[in-house]
Structure formats: structure tokens, C-alpha cells
Amino acid sequence: MKLSVIIVNYNVRAYLEQCLRTVFEALKGIEGDVFVVDNQSTDGSVEMVREKFPQVRLIANQENVGFSRANNQAIRESNAEHVVLLNPDTIVGEDVFQKVIAFMDRHPKAGGLGVKMIDGTGQFLPESKRGLPTPAVAFYKIIGLTRLFPKSRVFGRYHLGHLPENEAARIEILSGACMFLRKETLNRIGLLDESFFMYGEDIDLSYRITLGGYENWYLPHARIIHYKGESTKKSSVNYVFVFYNAMAIFAKKHFTQKRPDLFAGLINVAIYLSATGAIVTRFLRRALLPVLDLLLLALVGVLVMVIEGDSDYRIDGSFIYPLISMLVFFSIFGAYDLPVRLVNVFKAVVVGALFWLLVLWPFGEAGNWVASMVRSIARDMIMYGSLAVLVVGVVSRLMLHFLGLKNFSMRTLDRKRILAIGSEEEAKHAFALLWQTHFGLGRQIEMNAGLANSPDAVKQIRRSIRKHGIDEVVFCSKDLKWGRIIELIEELKRSGVMFKIAQPAREFIIGPSSIESVQDLLIMEDHAVSSSASRRIKRIFDVSLALILILLMPITILFVRHKVGFLKNLVRVIRGNNSWVGYFPHTDRAYRLPGIRPGVLDPVLADGLEPVPLTVERVNLTYAKDYRLAWDMRLVWRGFAQLGN
């Protein structure tokens, strides 16, 4: 047998299904087999493989044994000349396996080989070719010199930036996302080191390949898409510690014989610097709007004092109070929600101004110096302060929007303009699925698959994107070859649109960090129970109702059936463990609903409905898609006696 394809899967069912389709297309004409090693997924991956790909050699582990051990399980069972370790969130072109096998047959010293990888937006992934992370190379990366000088032969060696992206070359380290290996090489140097649970095992194996007298190669003419860590968020602190712990294992194994203290210290510095960076980055991403508002308001305050000739530049209550209060109202009324909506800024300013007017109005009746001071503060706060906050709130958001910062666009999540490339029938099915997940679309433009295969396809697609203001391009994989899709995505990477792929079975549309299907709902942001606004409103309602029920305890407890349970539920809701209203709880869901806190009440039993599967499914789905605070209030009123359940 020529080739064994080994895929280790963990809870990425849709990506795995897409990957397997591409793999079997690429295996045509090659004597090969496919292994899927599942590390105890809970998303139906195993059942999907058994049902749709019975020819796959499935190993369903009863525990998560890690990446290295899972791959080794399949490698030991393979009797092929070559094996390829492939991530499930990849797409393989039809000619990839043929090109790689031909190359390795021509280069008998090639023990391992990596291909050109692009992400779901078409951008080249620099980890396609990497250098050995020696202490010096690791140090340059940690202190940021690698990022500053990516093409340098000295500072850019981590990703071998000096090597051309589109030329074959010998490299030092292969990527575990797609690693072609000669079985003879593995028999001599050993399999993956199972002390690496996740990350680092590819570096260790690549290094041992070169120590064993073999070569590692980078072949750019074979291309794949790697959606890059759909189950791992690399901005997370957990990722940092797992990754650098793997680096510490590698360093201890290969580099610490001479200077163990130096390298151990370097690794520890990397861990804490990177963890700190991840925490700071996450904080800044979330705090950017509030911080920008504060800075601009402070600037406005200083300008006002300069204009008024206040040489002392003292910041008094007339500036501090409206500043703090308006930021609070911004938070309550969703001015910091994403995507940005200017209407929430107007709501916050209007309600804030009315609030201070009502609070300060009674002081105006008194005829003393206190009343005079309060009237002065009220005038500044309501007239000037509100106007300043409104202007700053609008300007800061427009500034971030026009700077093109991805997370701060004021475009809504629905009514997107879609270009579907494929046959008329497949395009219609794609639009139908997107209608369900987007709750409506804007423009729907079709392009025939024949045009997509023409020599000037890229030019025509770009023209259509500009002419119609396209947001997303959907490729219908039933009508286009996988290799052609990869080629088009790479060539269109600077077009500024999102690329997605509609699957042949018409069940999924897959893109970077998104899976759209009737089973995996993308709910319209305005009404979704999981949206920022809904979560905030729901939490305010939960806590407010709990406090009211506690204040009226001698009365409210009389109307509840289970008194002890009622008291426990009050504590759970205040602590955030529960909400007063949630989904009807059931385990066998056809739909993956947005996550919310478990409810004391549910919209099925509280409305006196029979909890048959069809009713439960429809009610839960409606609650998720079209959430309103009034619904929670009505359900609590109707099910008040059940608040102790």
C-alpha cells in the first residue's frame, strides 16, 4: 500500500466530514487507506464516520489520549509506504497526494515533507516551513525580533522567512497539521513522543528525522487549506501554558544537557511573558471602546477648561459625575456591544440625561447655596456633559469603524450580500440554508461554475465583489474541484470578503470559525437569547427579580410550592448559576441552541404545554431566536408557584 491518511479528531464533526470528502477525492488512483482516531468526541463525530464513511478505519477511543498517542495508534496499524498526519480542519486538493508521493519517490532521503498551507481567508500560514527552535531562535521570537524582521536569516529563522514562499526547499521543522512521513523513517527513528499531549510533538519528530540522517522538505506546489485550530483559541492563557510546556519538554529532551538552567529560565520567561501578553491583549480588545471614550472625554474636558481660561485645570464634580454615570449607562444600554450600533449610544445619553434631571430636580426648590451649586452642576451635567458624551460616543465608534478594525464594524450580522459560485440548483440550496441561519439576506448573486473555472475567473469574481458590495463568497463544492476552490481563495485573499464552502450533501456551509447549518444555528443578533444585549437584559432581570423577591419574602414565599427549593434558587440566580427562565432541559436535541444558563422555569411547562419532542424543539428554538424580556416576565408570572422547582 502506498499511503495511509491518519486524522485525529476531537469534536469538530463538520470539519472532519469536509476533510474526509477531500481526502477520498485526493486518494483516487492511489492505493491507500484512511484512519480516523477519535479522542472521545461528544458531537456525533464517530456516528457520522460510521454512517457516511464506512470505508474509514475508525479507532474510537474511550478517553482523550492526546495527539501523539492517537496518531501512533494508527501508525502501528498501517502497512503503507508513506503516512500523512492530517488535521480534521483541513481541505486537501485533488492533486496533493499525487504530487507529494512523486516528490518523495524522487528524493529517497526525504523522511518528512510539509506542504503550502493557507488559512480560510487565503493567507499564507508561515508555519508551513519552520526552523529549529534553538535557544537563540526561541529568544528572538520571545522578544519580538522575529515579528519585526520576518525575512531576516538570523531573526526570522523561526518561520524561515528568508526562504521564498513558492519555492521547494529543505526545512528543519514540519507542521503537525499536515505532515507526510516515510514509514521506513519512522521505523528507524521511532514514532511520535507520547510525553507530548498536544503541541511540540511535530517539532520533536522533525528534529529526530534530521538526526536520523533524513531530510525534511517544504513543497509549495501542493496546497491545502488549514482552518487553524478550530478547537483551540490561541489567544487563550490555557493555550500559552500548554504550548510552552510542550516547548519545555522538547528543550529538556534535546538542549538542556549543556546549559539546563539557561534554557529552563528562557522557557519560563516565555511562558509568563506570553501569558501576560494574552491577558493584556484580551483585556485591551474588550476595553478598547471604554478606554477610548474615557480618553476622548478627558480631552474634551481639558479643551473646555482651556477655552474657559481655567488656568488651574481642576477636574471637579461637574466633569467626573457625568463621565462616570454616562459610562455606566453606556454599559447598560449596549453602547459597548459588538457589532457597534450608534442607536445604543443615543439611548444611553437620553436616559442618562433624564436620570440626572430627575435626581437633581428636587434640589432646585431650595433657595440656598447648596441649591445654587446643584443647579450649576445639573446645568453642566445635563446640557454640556450629555452633549459631550454623545459626540464622543459617536466619534469614537465612527473612528474605529473607518479604521477598518474587524471587531468594531457597524455592519449588522444579518442581511449580508452573498455571491454563490456553482450551478443554479446548488446556489439556491446554499441561499436557502443561509436564509435560515442569517434570518434573511441582502443581495444574492450567482456565478456559474463554468466561469469560476475560466482563466479570468479571479478578475470576474473581483469585479462582481466590487460591483455588488459582496460580503461573503460561497463556493459550491459539488460543482467545483477542491483544488480549484483552494486556488481561488488564495488568489482572492485581498478582496476583503469572507469565504465559505457549501458541502455536497447540502447540510453544512463551512467557513473560518463558523459552521452554518440548520443544526448549528447562527441566530440574528438583534433577537438571539445569546446576544450581548439579551444576556445583559436577562441578567439584570434575574438579579432585580431575585432582590425584589427577597425584599417581599414574607409574602412571596407563601405563593411558592417548594419553599426550600425557592430559597436555594434565589441563591443560585444571584450567584449566576441559574436564570429564572431557560430552555426546556433535554439531552436529545436536533438543534444546537446558543448556550445560556439553566432555567428554574422553562417556556414549555410554564405555559402548560405537553413536553413532547416536537413541541419542545419548536418552543426552545423560538425562545432562542426571538427572545424578549416580556417573555421571561410573562413566564415568571404564570409559573410563579413553580419557582421552587
Image (cartoon, rainbow, N blue to C red):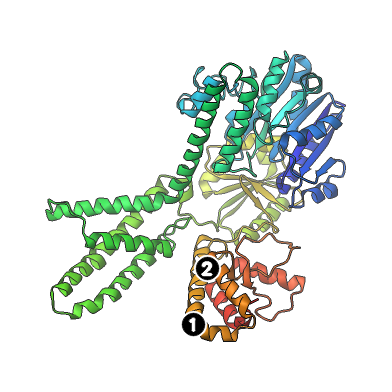
Seen from the viewer's position, the closer of residues 200 and 28 is 200
Q: Residue at x 84, y 23 (%)?
A: 81
Q: Position of residue 410 (x, y in %)?
A: 45, 54
Of the pair 37 and 483, the residue shown nearer to us = 37
Q: Which quadrant of the rendered structure holds the N terminus?
A: top right
Expressed as whole percent of the image width and height from the top left, the position of residue 185 reads: 78, 19
Q: How far apart are labels 2 and 1 at the CA level?
A: 16 Å
Marker disc for residue 94? none
Position of 446 compared to 71: left or right? left
Asked if residue 100 shows in the view, the reply is: yes
Q: Is residue 433 above or below residue 495?
A: below
Mark carried by residue 552: 1
Kind of residue at badge 1: Leu
Category of crowding for the residue at label 1, using alpha-carbon neighbours closer than 10 angstroms: few (below 14), some (14–19), many (at least 20) = few
Callout 2: few (<14), some (14-19), or many (20+) C-alpha neighbours within 10 Å? some
Secondary structure at numbered mark 2: helix
Q: Position of residue 442 (x, y in %)?
A: 56, 57
Q: Is residue 583 above or below residue 48?
A: below
Residue drawn at x 42%, y 64% as measured from the top left: 332
Report the quarter where the C terminus lies.
bottom right
Q: Is residue 222 visible?
A: no
Find residue 100 and report its image quarter: top right
Which element is circle 1 on?
Answer: loop
Label drawn at residue 574: 2
Kindly identify the amino acid type of the residue bearing the numbered disc 2: Ile
Q: Is residue 4 left or right of residue 472?
A: right
